[in-house]
Amino acid sequence: MVEIVDFSVEETSIEGLVVLTMKQVTDDRGTVREFYRESAFVAAGLPSLGPWVQVNVTQTNKGAIRGMHGEQMHKLVAVAAGRGHGAWVDARPGSPTAGAVVELDLVPGAQVLVPPGVCNGFQSRSDSMQYVYCFDNEWQPGMDGVAVSPLDPALGIVWPEPFDADDPAMVSEKDRSAPTLAEVLGIGS
């Protein structure tokens, strides 16, 4: 028996941030997922993003948090193996959705298209989660972008797994010491 899940697009409360369901074909051998098909993206009204110029895969231990980073590039992100919890915040000054936060449980088959300047972060919910990032621009040290602390209480993010915020194996010093969203957006200055 063959099961087919069609490609679909769901808007979020952050302008330009969309949740995608990959086209998936499952049979007795397992599942094939279309990670990126240019024609499907364009037909859905999404930007043409090919060719990707950098692809990273992270392996993250249960409870560890990575992010929130919003470089000036499109990112297509997804869990390849395991399970996670994703969070995104619009840190673009002047954006009509500046300050909006979206959270989503991440499982294989779900993707998120992250526009430039929207911060991306996640927490692993399985012993070893693999997270795939496709970039339309190569990451460079010091490139334009923004970071927000994933621990900023004003974001209201509920990280579902217990973690020690002072343990660098759970949250890096760089992420822990990133500015708050209010500091990034110049609110209250």
Image (cartoon, grey):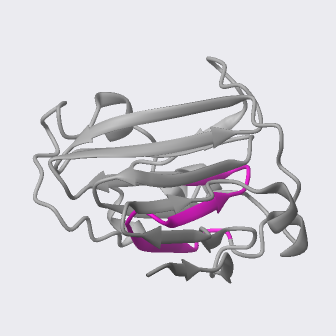
Q: Is residue 80 magenta?
A: no
Residue 24 falls left or right of residue 58? right
Q: Which residues are magenta?
A: 98-119
**Relative horizontal placement of residue 70, taking residue 102 as reference (left or right):** right
Locate residue 144, reporting x and y percent. Answer: 72, 32
Q: Considering depth in this image, is 156 or 27 the residue closer to the camera?
A: 27
Camera-side residue: 155 or 45? 45
Task: Identify which residue is drawn at 36% across, 57% down.
Answer: 152
Which of 46/98 is in front? 46
* Number of marks present in the image shown: 0
Q: Is 110 colored magenta in this rendering?
A: yes
Q: Residue at x 74, y 73 (%)?
A: 15
Q: Residue at x 28, y 55 (%)?
A: 82
Give the quadrant of residue 138: top right
Image quarter of residue 115: bottom right
Q: Quadrant of the C terminus?
A: bottom right
Give the residue at the far top of this rendering: 141
Quarter of the picture holding the N terminus: bottom left
Residue 123 in the image: state x and y as whole percent.
Answer: 30, 54
Q: Residue at x 65, y 57 (%)?
A: 114
Give left or right: position of 166 versus 28.
left
Q: Is residue 149 visible?
A: yes
Q: Give the image location of residue 164, x and y in percent.
A: 10, 46
